[in-house]
Structures are given as structure tokens and as C-alpha cells.
């Protein structure tokens, strides 16, 4: 049939490739999971520490929390323009917003579907969400890592990059945060640089760029010489022995990232199984993940989210092909038994979960009969899954419940962080609104009565952020004569000549991690706002009017 | 428990990271150096940490240590990629690597378990060791500060503490745990390393019997190094059970173990505790009876490795054992090399040579006494290998061309430490006192020397007498030359007559015996070295060992003890080196007793007395271990502060508070103290925070007993006195500011030394920031203006 012979005239169809559509959807999810945090999230955790350091640099004060990464320097600059966390966060968000594009460019290396799954995993990973928006010293790191990996994976793109541009890459890495170190280790260990075009000149440019970066950082980007410093190393070191976070990285994994970790490790195992046919980029990816994992293991008890965030990118890239392979296996598996066994098993586990959720709400396990019921239900559920797994042909069907369980954890954690739920353990501690109210009260009193605001040294670090732009504050262990407002430890005697305004004011809130016991962990799933929080408390005294 | 596992895993990870480097450095070893990787990895990563901290690249704390280990791993990966034989080597030595990891593991957990029954860090010089360990961990600047002399860098050979700190940081355990586990790591590294070296030498020597004899040699070397002891154990046991023979005890110079005679004066050196206190069990239960084992030869310290591990001081001579074994392995590997060494070797393998330089330089950094002996042995090994392929002059030039730059690099590599290090050595002096009676010498070194003689006996049947005789006259100069040097040196000091007479007949006999054994060993070594035979290595080790003992009979290194016990440290340190050397030679020697061939009958004949002596040498550990651990009763913990927490909660709380609240750079005032006091200098020791002055005598030892140093330290003590004796707040503040201090501690040591300290004055002048029990900490009042705009 010719067109002219057609009795009907058809309108041209608008064809949107499914791949593109899905890509847009996942990228949108990625952005939506982060954009709200820019304005909504409380300042807390390592962001609080970083912003305090940046503010101190702006104010001309020396503070160990100022680590001269490029982002920290820009954050100081932005805080000088406006004393809000929003501007630095917008900067981080803008950098992170480029990650979907970087993943788009990775399609030829990993395949479109795997790229999308990897991006989706990254979109939902709580630690990646936090570090992708929060104004921490490592604010640019995730974006930098994603783009560096694109360059590594895409030889055709690499060919187009002039050798001198590697100077910029060296510069960017040298003034990056701690998250870049595992990739640097992987690049060096897998000898990836010689594979690049003009290796000698590119390497020279890299080293020169890095040297310039280190020089600039050592000069504090103009904030003053503070000794020789390599920012990624300084940032890495600060993740040990610090007290900026109320949550150990091991707990962060338990709460948010264990499905990603398991999937990533499975993906790594699959790659290692085929090690004879691995490409250099895959070796680099494996080494990157291994270095990150080593960091996580060493820092499992350290209060920091960074090791987990450092793993999110390589784990997502490793997990995606494994998930894809798992789904494909499940699709081709024999479902004749599993189509009954798996729903039954899931149902039994869910019913057992309902009991346990109830225990979690009550914060105690049920009586012996309840325990017996739960054990029986769980046993029966596991048995049902086992029935599905007896036959090798149907074993892959278990991928479905495993993915479902992992998705629940990722979604719950991702939305908890992305929506800044009240009492969410990430970030912890947070600077509460009451700290800003305290500042207003202090300034108002000082304005009305003159004198000075005096803060006990115990709170010298904590007041930096909430008391930003409050003029001069006296940090003193003894109340000076000129004091009009005194912020003092609650367990010390009332200063002579002052009246108590508030004996228990919270300067910092520390949401607890729901990892003390398994009931607490379940309870957290049932009631996201059930977690208790401790507080950094102080007493507020003012000098009475004469 | 988790801390112990983390420490063990950390040590093994570091060892694994060094495996590719060991393959390159020790390729000639049958295990490619796998048994030496725990020490090689630790030395290289600790050096990396030290130098990068000094250059301000790394930061303090765990992060810096982990990055140093990561760098080592990175270098390991790069070396492995560049080494075409890496995979093949790994496949070849894989089972051996697992075996050495197993030896390390068993030794580590065994020692940790033993130590957990007496984990308290106190007594002898353990507070000093803890002080240095803490200094390595917390010092904000590198080279690290001296917590017992605020404002000054440490002036000691502290690399062993740095290595313990490295493992402590990697494992993330507190210093009080790291101290004890550091000892366990040294024990385990020593076991793996000595087994590796002895196995290598045995495998090279016993080509046909290697499957049977290599494990025997390795096991025997472990036993000789880590368990064999002075033969005093049998005397202690029989004295405790009151079955003694005074003439026998007197013959061996151990009459001090016997109960005092009724007419003995108060100065008499004898046992006064009464029979009832000696034992109520099969082993002596007398408190620390085993201490006497470290004082067998009068006027000296006669420590041996087992004693050191039993005592548990984390001292340089102890921590350096694995490093010394690594240096010996390098020398042995060099000797077995097929190619001569010259400057061209450095150009061809610059990174290997750099690693060798780091290892040889570390000998000085870890235990300064070791550097001359073992770096010298390395040079001799290079010369020996060059001599096999070139005439003397050319070989010497090549040797200088190779070792010169390496030794120079070693000096440059450790310059940051060397610039701060003040050696206590005041020169080489002739020893003109009483010589060591032969039976006392036998009591101390009988087991390892006898074991090493077995190898000599085995070799004797395999070398034609003519060959021996050609070399013997030259080798004779080795023991004769020191004697020829001693005489004029003694005459120069006006002590020749005295020296000749005071030595006594026994002293001369010992000297002659040691000289003869040295001569025999070195003759055999040189004869076999010329043929490139591996037995030369073990014989050279044995010859060097007896030469060291011989040298310690003739000379001494003058130090702070010169006026009282002049050769105390010389005999101690050189005897310790000799023990390590003899353990390897002895291990191989004991294996030779089982060898097939022409000496089989000789071996069988020798086996009986050797076994008897070895049995006697193992009685001491058998008795001492239950004594030290209370027969493994009581609470066990790897935390060195567990007893402190139990017995003195206030002082324990003080430690925790200082660790948590006081910046590492702050100066904390505490009472000065006498050396060897468990509680003295406890702030510096237990927290690494700088204090104005700690153990006075030790600071003098480290910095030199000069008038200027005495005056300086006394002035600091007086300043501290002013703090605690101040009667007005202004005086107190002035005194504290004079010391640049931020905190003042008032606890039992302060109240005892300064009973008149006015708490009212303290309260008025300073802020009370800590108070638990009778322990208080005061802080200098803070007042600072912080701009927030």
C-alpha cells in the first residue's frame, strides 16, 4: 500500500524511546530525592562541622574544622555573602545534579539498563543523598568521582580531552575531599593512567595540577597559611577520632545501606568469577570498591558517614549488573512451584514481621506463645522459600523476594533522609531551631542591657554555627564583669549576680541510631519518629537590670 | 576480644601488603621472604608514616596510619604488577605463606593469652615504654614530642614504639591495649621471622635431607630464640625445694639464690625470704624469682629474649628482634645472590636498594646498638658475594659502590630522627674489671652456644683439613686483633696492669674459650664462603655471636653507668644480639644432628648432651610462666589499665578524662618523680600529654649527663615545685604560665611530694575541671574573644 493509495491520513507518531523515558524518570527521582534537602534539612552531622569551619574562616578565626577543600573554600566565600547554609547546598546540589548525565554517558560501558539501575540505587541511598546535598568538606566529591569514572570508562571521550585538561583533573582531586582517595588508590593500583592518551604529558599535567591544588589549599585559598596540607588526606584523617557525627559508619550501613552493600559485593563476586575477561575499567571499579570497603571496615566504629558515602558510587555500579543478571535469571527460572511458595513465604514472613513490629512498638518481646508463633511463622516462611530453592531451575526466583526486601530498606532509608524526617538519625547531631532562638534572645538582651555575651569554653565549638554573625562573643571559663548574658554548663553553680532564664536549653540534638537492639531497629521501621534524642544542654543566665 | 582480633588482622594485612616487596628483596629465600613480611610490612609502613608525618603530609591519629598502610599496599600492588615472576612466586610459596601466617597467628594469640594474666603496665621501665607509645600516638607534631620534657622532641631510638603505635592505630585500640598486643605482635613476628631464616639456611645446607631437617631447624630456632633460657632454672627449682649443693651453686656463681648463712651481713647477696615464701607448689612461687635470671653475670644485665617477653617491657632491644632477623635475612639473601653487587646494581634496582636502606637505617632508629653489628654484617655479606667473582681490590670497590650509597641513603632517610637524637654512648673503653667466669658464661649462653657448635661438628667432617688450615691463620686475626687493641687502649687509660690482674683466671679462660670458638666458627665460615656454601651463613652468624661476647669481655661502651656498673649495657646489648644470631645457628646445628652422611655418628653422640642442655634451658620458662601468671589464675584482660581501673578508679578516670578533654598539644603539670616509679610521670606515660619533667634520671640518660642538662632539668623541677608550693593565686598563675602549662593535676603523687599544697590557692587561681576521689585537675582560666562576624 502506498501512501497515496491510503484512504486514511495518519498523523506522525511521537515516539519516545522507553529507555529515554525511564532515564528521565530515574534522573527525576534522583533530583527530587535531593532537592528538598537544600532548604528543608536541618544543619547537622558533618555538615554542621564543615559549615562551622567555613564560617570561622570567613570570620578570620582559626578552626581545625576548616579543611581547605575547594568546596570548603567556596562555602566560606558564599557564607561571606549570606549567612545561610542554602547557598553552599545549592552548589553541592548543582554538582550532584550532573551525576545522572555522567551515568548517561556510562551507558556504552555498562549498558543502558545497568546504568539506570545504578542511578536508581544511588538516588535512593541515604548516605549518597546526604553527601550529595549537604555542605560538607566533601561536597563536590560524588560528582567529581562520577565524572572521573566517565573519563576512565569512555576512551572515546578521553581522546577528546586535551592533555592540559588533566591538570584540571589533578587540581580537582588534590583539593577534593576524602571520598576521592579510594578512586585515587584504584587508579594507581590498576595502573590506569598510562592507558590515557599522551600518558607522559597527561601525567605531568595531573601532577602539576595536583601540586598547584595542594599549594592553593596550603594557603587556605587565601584564608591564610596553615601549614602544608593535602585536603583529601586531611579530610580522610578527620573521619577518625572525631565527634562531628552522632552515628558510626557501621551503624549507617546497618540503617541505610546494607542492601546496596550486599548487592555490590555480589556484583563484585560475579566480576571476579570472570576475572580473565575483565576490562581495565572493571578492575579499577573493583579496586575502588575494595579500597572503599577497607576504609569502611577500618572506620566502622568511627562517627562519620563518609566511608559509606565513598562506597555508594562503586557499589551502585557493581550492583546494577548483578541485579540485572539476577532479574534475568528469575525471569527465565521455573516458576511452577515458586509462584505459590514465594508469595506464601512472603506472607508468613510479613505476618511474623507484624508480630515483631508490635513488639517493637512495645519495646519488648512478646510472651512465650508469641515467640513460638513468630518462630513457627518464620520457620514456615523460610521453608516455603526453601521449597522454591530446592530445584536448581527455580532457585533464581528467590531474587524477587530478596530484591523486594532490599528495596524496602533502601526506600525507607532514602525517603527518611530525602524528606528530612524528624529524628532521622542521618544527620546527627543537628543544630536545632532552639539554638537560633537562643542567639536571638542573647542578642536582644545584649542590645537592651549592653555588656557581653559570654559562653563557657565547653560550648565554644558548638555555638559557632547558630551564633554566626552575632558580633564578638567572649569565651571564658569565669564570668567576667562585663557579661550580660551567660551560657553556662547546667551542672555548675549559678554565676553570682545573674538570674536564670532557662536552666536546660538544647544547643545540639543527637538523634540516636536505632541499632542498640533489634527491637529498636524494627520499631524504627514502624514509627519513624519514635527515636529518642539526647541533647547538648546549657543554662542561660542574664544579669538583672539595675 | 574484638581489639585482639583487629590487631591480629591489622598485622596480617600489613604483612600481606608487603608480600610483593619481600618477593623482590628476598627472592633467594625458599619462602621468598613470606615469613619476614610481618616485620618488613611494619617497618616500611611505619617509616612511611614517620616521614610523611614529619613532612606534614599525613595527619595524626588513625587516619594517618591507615593511609601509610594504604600506601604500602599501593606500592605492593605496583611492585607485583611490575614483577613478571610475582604470580609464579606466589603460587610456589603460597603454602609456606599460609604456614608462616599460621605460626604468626598461634604465637600471637598464645602470647596475648599469656600476657592477659599479667597485663598491668607498671613497674620496671614499663611506664617509660607506655610514655613513648603514647607519644607516638598523640604527638601533634613529628618528630614526636617527649611527654616527660615538655617542648622537647623525643631523644631516643623510638622506632619500635612507632611500630606498636602503627598497629594500635590500625586496630583502633587504646594505647593500654596496644602496648600488650604490641608485645604479642613482636613475639609472633619473631617466631615467623626466625623460622623463615633458619628454614632458608637449613634448606640451602641440607639439600638431600631438607624435607626432614628444614622443619626441625625452623622449630629449633623458634625454641632457642623465644623459649630457651639461662640454665639457672634448675638451680632455682632445687633451691625452692631445698635440695641444694652450696659448692655447686658457688661454682656457677648463683649462691645468691641460696638462703643466707646465719652470719651473713646485711650487705650479703643471698635469699632472705624464708623457706615458706619460696614455694607452695611444684614451681617456685616466690615473687618474681625469675628476675634473678637476668642478673647471672655480676655487674651486667643478662637478659635473653624469653626473659624479656616474660617481663613484658616494650623495650627497643625486644622490639628490634624481628628487625634484626630481617637484616640477617637480607645479609643471607645477599650472600646467596648469583650476581655481584656494585653501584650498577643500585642503578638497576633503585627501589629495592631504597627498601634495604630503610631497613638498615631502621636498625639504628629501633635499637641503636644493632646498627653497627648488623649493617656491618650486611656489608660483609656483600663483600663475600663480590669476592666470589672478583679479586679483593675490585670486590672492595664494588662493595663500597653498593653499600656506600645505601648506607648514605639510610642516614638521609632517618635524618629527622638523627638530628634530635643524642647518643648516650661516650666512646669505646677497655674493660678492666673482673672477667666473666666460664661457668657463669655457660649458665647464661650455654644452650645456644652448644647448639651452634653442633653445626661446627657437622661441617668439620665435610671440609678437607687442608682447606681449614689455609684459612685458619687469617681467621686467627679476628680474635687476636681485639686483644691487641685492648692492651694499648688499657695502657692509654693507665689501666693495663689493673686490667690484666682484675680479670682473674676465670675471666681469661672465658676469653680464651670465646676466642677459640670464634676462631673455629669464622675459619669454617670463611672456608665455606669461598666455595659459596650456605653453611657459611650459619657459621658466620655463630662466629659473629661469639665475637660479640668476646668483645664484651674486652671492651665497653661508656655510658651513664660507667662509674658504677661499667659494662652493664655492653654485655646486655651485645649478649642479646649474640642470642639472636646463635638461635639461628643453633637451630640449624640441632637439625644437623639428625642429618645423614659422614657425621651421623658424631651427631648421635652429640645429641645426648645437647638434648640435656636444651632440656635444662627450658626449665626456666617452665617455672617462670606459672609464677608470672599466678598459674593462669585470676582475671585476664589485654587492657594494661584493667588493674588501674580496679585498684585506683580515680587515677583511671583521670586518664580517660585527660585523653578525652585535653588537647594533645597541651602541657599538663604533674609532680616530678624518680625513675622506675609506677605512678611517677603517670600523666605523660598514660596519656602522652606533655608534662614539664617526668623521670629525671631517664631524661639525663637520653640527653646526656652534662652539667648543663642537670641544671636545666633541675630548673624545670624547681618551676614545678613553685606551682605546688605557691601560696597566692598570683604566684600560682605566674608559675603555671612560666611552664606554658594549661592544666595542673593534683593526685596522690602530688599530695605526697607536696604535702603543703594549698587547695584554696588552687581553687582561687585556677578552674577545677575534674574531680574524682582525691584526684583533681585544674585548668588555667580561659578568656578569649571570638569574632562571629
Image (tube, coloured by chain):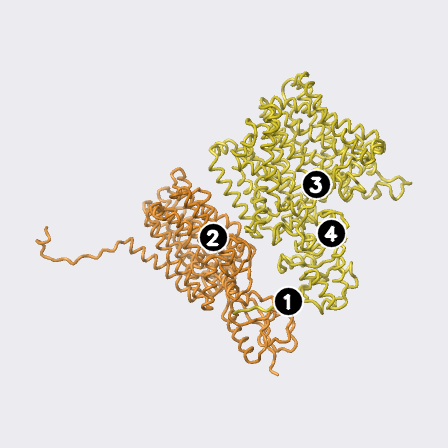
Question: What is the CA distance from the residue labelled 3 to the residue labelled 4?
Answer: 22 Å
User: Of the residues under marks 1 and 3, which one precedes in the sequence?
Assistant: 3
- Where is mark 1, residue-wise? B782
When the figure is inspected, residue A150 is found, relative to residue B198, above or below; the finding is below
Q: Which residue of the protein is positioned furthest toward the left in this rendering?
A: A5
Q: Where is residue B460 in the image (x, y as percent from the top left)?
A: 68, 20
Q: Do labels 1 and 3 share a chain?
A: yes
Classify 10 Å Cα crowding around label 1: few (below 14), some (14-19), many (20 and above): some
The circle on residue A212 is 2
Q: Position of residue B336 (x, y in %)?
A: 58, 27
User: What is the display colour for chain A?
Assistant: orange
Q: Can residue B129 be seen in this view?
A: yes
Comparing labels 1 and 2, the label whose residue is closer to the camera: 2
* Chain bearing mark 2: A
Question: What is the CA distance from the residue labelled 4 to the residue labelled 2?
Answer: 46 Å
- Where is mark 4, residue-wise? B695
The circle on residue B308 is 3
Question: What is the CA distance from the residue labelled 1 to the residue labelled 2?
Answer: 39 Å
* Chain bearing mark 4: B
Amino acid at each position: 500500500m502506498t501512501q497515496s493509495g491510503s484512504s486514511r491520513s495518519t498523523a506522525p507518531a511521537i515516539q519516545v524511546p522507553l529507555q529515554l523515558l525511564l532515564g528521565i524518570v530515574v534522573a527525576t527521582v534522583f533530583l527530587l530525592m535531593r532537592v528538598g534537602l537544600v532548604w528543608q534539612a536541618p544543619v547537622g552531622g558533618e555538615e554542621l562541622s564543615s559549615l562551622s569551619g567555613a564560617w570561622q574562616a570567613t570570620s578570620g578565626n582559626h578552626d581545625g574544622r576548616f579543611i581547605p577543600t575547594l568546596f570548603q573554600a567556596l562555602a566560606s566565600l558564599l557564607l561571606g555573602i549570606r549567612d545561610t547554609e542554602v547557598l553552599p547546598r545549592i552548589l553541592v546540589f548543582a554538582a550532584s545534579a550532573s551525576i545522572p548525565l555522567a551515568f548517561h554517558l556510562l551507558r556504552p560501558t555498562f549498558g543502558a539498563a545497568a546504568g539506570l539501575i545504578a542511578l536508581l540505587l544511588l538516588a535512593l541511598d541515604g548516605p549518597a543523598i546526604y553527601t550529595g546535598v549537604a555542605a560538607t568538606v566533601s561536597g563536590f566529591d560524588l560528582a567529581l568521582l562520577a565524572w572521573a569514572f566517565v573519563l576512565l570508562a569512555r576512551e572515546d571521550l578521553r581522546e577528546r580531552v586535551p592533555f592540559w585538561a588533566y591538570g584540571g583533573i589533578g587540581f580537582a582531586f588534590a583539593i577534593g575531599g576524602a571520598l576521592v582517595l579510594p578512586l585515587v588508590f584504584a587508579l594507581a593500583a590498576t595502573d590506569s593512567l598510562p592507558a590515557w592518551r599522551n600518558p607522559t604529558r597527561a601525567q605531568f599535567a595531573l601532577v602539576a595540577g595536583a601540586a598547584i591544588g595542594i599549594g592553593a589549599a596550603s594557603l587556605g585559598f587565601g584564608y591564610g597559611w596553615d601549614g602544608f596540607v593535602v585536603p583529601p588526606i586531611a579530610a580522610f584523617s578527620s573521619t577518625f577520632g572525631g565527634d562531628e557525627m552522632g552515628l558510626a559508619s557501621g551503624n549507617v550501613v546497618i540503617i541505610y545501606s546494607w542492601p546496596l552493600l550486599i548487592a555490590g559485593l555480589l556484583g563484585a563476586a560475579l566480576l571476579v568469577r570472570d576475572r580473565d575477561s575483565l576490562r581495565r575499567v572493571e578492575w579499577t571499579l573493583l579496586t575502588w570498591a575494595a579500597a572503599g570497603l577497607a576504609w569502611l571496615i577500618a572506620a566502622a566504629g568511627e562517627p562519620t558517614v563518609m566511608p559509606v558515602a565513598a562506597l555508594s558510587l562503586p557499589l551502585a555500579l557493581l550492583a546494577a549488573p548483578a541485579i540485572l543478571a539476577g532479574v534475568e535469571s528469575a525471569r527465565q527460572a521455573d516458576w511452577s512451584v515458586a509462584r505459590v511458595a514465594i508469595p506464601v513465604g512472603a506472607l508468613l514472613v510479613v505476618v511474623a514481621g507484624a508480630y515483631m513490629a508490635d513488639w517493637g512498638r512495645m519495646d519488648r518481646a512478646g510472651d512465650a506463645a508469641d515467640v513460638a508463633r513468630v518462630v513457627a511463622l518464620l520457620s514456615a516462611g523460610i521453608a516455603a522459600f526453601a521449597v522454591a530453592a530446592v530445584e536448581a531451575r527455580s532457585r533464581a526466583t528467590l531474587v524477587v523476594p530478596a530484591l523486594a526486601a532490599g528495596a524496602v530498606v533502601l526506600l525507607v532509608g532514602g525517603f527518611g533522609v530525602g524528606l528530612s524526617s524528624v529524628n532521622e538519625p542521618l544527620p546527627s547531631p543537628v543544630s536545632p531551631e532552639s539554638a537560633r532562638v537562643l542567639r536571638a534572645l542573647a542578642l536582644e538582651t545584649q542590645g537592651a542591657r549592653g555588656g557581653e555575651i559570654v559562653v563557657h569554653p565547653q560550648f565554644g565549638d558548638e555555638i559557632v554555627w547558630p551564633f554566626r554573625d552575632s558580633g564578638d562573643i567572649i569565651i571564658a571559663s569565669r564570668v567576667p564583669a562585663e557579661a550580660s548574658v551567660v551560657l553556662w554548663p547546667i551542672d555548675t553553680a549559678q554565676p553570682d549576680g545573674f538570674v536564670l532564664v532557662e536552666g536546660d536549653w538544647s544547643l545540639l540534638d543527637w538523634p540516636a541510631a536505632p541499632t542498640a537492639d533489634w527491637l529498636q531497629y524494627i520499631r524504627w521501621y514502624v514509627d519513624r519518629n519514635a527515636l529518642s534524642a539526647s541533647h547538648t544542654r546549657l543554662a542561660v543566665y542574664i544579669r538583672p537590670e539595675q | 576480644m574484638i581489639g585482639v582480633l583487629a590487631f591480629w588482622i591489622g598485622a596480617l594485612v600489613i604483612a600481606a601488603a608487603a608480600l610483593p616487596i619481600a618477593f623482590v628483596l628476598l627472592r633467594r629465600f625458599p619462602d621468598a621472604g613470606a615469613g619476614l613480611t610481618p616485620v618488613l610490612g611494619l617497618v616500611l609502613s611505619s617509616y612511611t608514616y614517620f616521614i610523611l608525618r614529619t613532612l606534614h603530609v599525613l595527619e595524626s591519629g588513625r587516619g594517618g596510619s591507615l593511609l601509610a598502610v594504604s600506601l604500602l599496599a599501593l606500592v605492593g600492588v605496583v611492585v607485583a604488577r611490575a614483577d613478571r615472576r610475582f604470580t609464579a612466586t606466589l603460587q610456589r610459596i603460597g603454602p609456606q605463606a599460609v604456614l608462616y601466617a599460621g605460626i604468626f597467628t598461634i604465637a600471637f594469640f598464645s602470647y596475648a593469652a599469656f600476657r592477659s594474666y599479667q597485663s598491668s603496665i607498671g613497674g620496671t621501665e614499663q611506664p617509660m615504654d607506655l610514655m613513648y607509645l603514647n607519644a607516638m600516638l598523640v604527638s601533634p607534631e613529628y618528630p614526636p614530642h617527649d611527654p616527660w620534657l615538655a617542648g622537647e622532641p623525643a631523644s631516643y631510638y623510638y622506632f619500635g614504639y612507632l611500630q606498636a603505635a602503627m598497629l594500635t592505630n590500625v586496630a583502633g585500640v587504646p594505647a593500654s591495649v596496644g602496648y600488650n598486643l604490641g608485645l604479642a605482635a613482636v613475639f609472633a613476628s619473631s617466631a615467623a621471622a626466625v623460622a623463615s631464616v633458619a628454614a632458608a639456611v637449613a634448606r640451602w645446607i641440607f639439600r638431600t635431607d631438607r624435607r626432614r631437617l628444614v622443619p626441625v631447624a625452623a622449630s629449633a630456632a623458634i625454641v632457642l630464640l623465644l623459649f630457651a633460657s639461662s640454665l639457672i632454672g634448675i638451680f632455682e627449682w632445687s633451691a625452692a625445694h631445698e635440695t641444694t649443693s652450696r659448692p655447686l651453686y658457688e661454682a656457677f656463681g648463683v649462691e645468691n639464690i641460696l638462703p643466707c648463712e646465719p652470719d651473713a651481713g646485711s650487705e650479703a647477696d643471698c635469699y632472705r625470704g624464708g623457706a615458706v615464701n619460696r614455694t607452695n607448689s611444684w614451681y617456685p612461687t616466690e615473687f618474681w624469682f625469675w628476675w634473678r635470671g637476668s642478673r647471672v653475670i655480676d655487674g651486667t644485665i643478662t637478659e635473653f629474649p624469653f626473659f624479656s617477653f616474660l617481663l613484658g617491657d616494650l623495650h627497643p632491644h625486644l622490639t628490634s628482634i624481628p628487625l634484626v632477623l630481617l637484616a640477617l635475612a637480607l645479609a643471607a639473601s645477599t650472600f646467596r645472590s648469583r650476581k655481584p653487587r656494585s653501584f650498577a646494581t643500585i642503578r638497576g634496582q633503585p627501589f629495592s636498594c631504597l627498601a634495604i636502606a630503610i631497613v638498615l637505617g631502621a636498625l639504628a632508629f629501633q635499637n641503636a646498638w644493632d646498627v653497627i653489628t648488623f649493617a656491618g654484617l650486611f656489608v660483609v655479606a656483600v663483600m663475600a658475594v663480590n669476592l666470589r667473582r672478583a679479586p679483593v681490590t675490585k670486590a672492595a670497590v664494588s662493595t663500597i659502590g653498593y653499600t656506600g650509597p645505601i648506607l648514605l641513603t639510610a642516614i638521609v632517610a632517618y635524618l629527622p630522627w638523627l638530628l634530635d637524637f643524642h647518643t648516650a654512648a661516650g666512646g669505646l673503653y677497655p674493660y678492666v674489671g673482673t672477667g666473666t667466669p666460664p661457668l657463669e658464661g655457660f649458665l647464661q649462653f650455654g644452650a645456644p652456644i652448644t647448639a651452634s657448635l653442633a653445626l661446627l661438628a657437622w661441617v668439620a667432617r665435610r671440609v678437607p683439613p687442608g682447606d681449614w688450615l689455609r684459612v685458619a691463620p687469617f681467621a686467627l686475626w679476628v680474635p687476636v686483633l681485639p686483644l691487641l687493641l685492648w692492651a694499648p687502649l688499657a695502657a692509654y687509660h693507665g689501666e693495663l696492669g689493673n686490667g690484666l690482674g682484675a680479670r682473674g683466671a676465670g675471666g681469661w679462660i672465658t676469653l680464651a674459650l670465646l676466642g677459640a670458638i670464634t676462631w673455629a666458627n669464622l675459619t669454617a665460615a670463611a672456608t665455606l664462603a669461598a666455595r659459596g656454601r650456605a653453611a657459611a651463613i650459619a657459621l658466620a652468624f655463630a662466629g659473629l655471636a661469639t665475637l660479640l661476647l668476646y668483645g664484651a669481655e674486652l671492651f665497653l661502651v661508656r655510658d651513664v653507668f660507667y662509674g658504677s656498673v661499667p659494662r652493664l649495657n655492653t654485655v646486655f646489648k651485645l649478649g642479646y644480639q649474640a642470642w639472636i644470631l646463635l638461635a639461628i645457628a643453633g637451630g640449624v646445628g640441632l637439625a644437623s644432628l639428625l642429618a645423614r652422611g659422614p657425621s651421623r655418628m658424631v651427631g648421635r653422640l652429640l645429641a645426648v648432651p645437647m638434648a640435656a642442655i636444651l632440656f635444662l634451658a627450658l626449665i626456666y620458662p617452665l617455672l617462670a610462666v606459672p609464677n608470672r601468671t599466678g598459674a593462669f589464675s585470676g582475671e585476664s584482660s589485654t587492657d594494661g589499665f584493667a588493674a588501674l581501673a580496679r585498684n585506683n578508679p580515680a587515677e583511671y578516670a583521670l586518664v580517660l578524662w585527660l585523653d578525652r578533654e585535653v588537647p594533645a598539644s597541651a602541657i599538663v603539670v604533674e609532680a616530678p618523680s624518680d625513675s622506675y616509679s609506677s605512678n611517677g610521670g603517670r600523666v605523660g606515660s598514660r596519656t602522652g600529654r606533655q608534662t614539664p619533667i617526668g623521670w629525671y634520671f631517664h631524661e639525663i640518660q637520653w640527653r646526656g649527663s652534662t652539667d648543663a642538662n642537670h641544671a636545666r632539668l633541675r630548673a624545670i623541677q624547681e618551676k614545678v615545685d613553685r606551682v605546688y608550693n605557691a601560696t597566692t593565686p598570683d604566684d600560682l598563675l605566674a608559675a603555671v604560665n612560666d611552664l606554658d602549662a594549661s592544666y595542673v593535676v593534683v593526685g596522690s603523687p602530688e599530695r605526697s611530694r607536696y604535702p603543703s599544697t594549698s587547695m584554696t590557692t588552687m581553687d582561687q587561681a585556677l578552674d577545677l575541671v575534674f574531680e574524682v576521689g582525691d584526684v583533681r585537675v585544674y585548668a588555667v582560666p580561659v578568656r578569649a574573644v571570638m569574632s562571629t562576624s
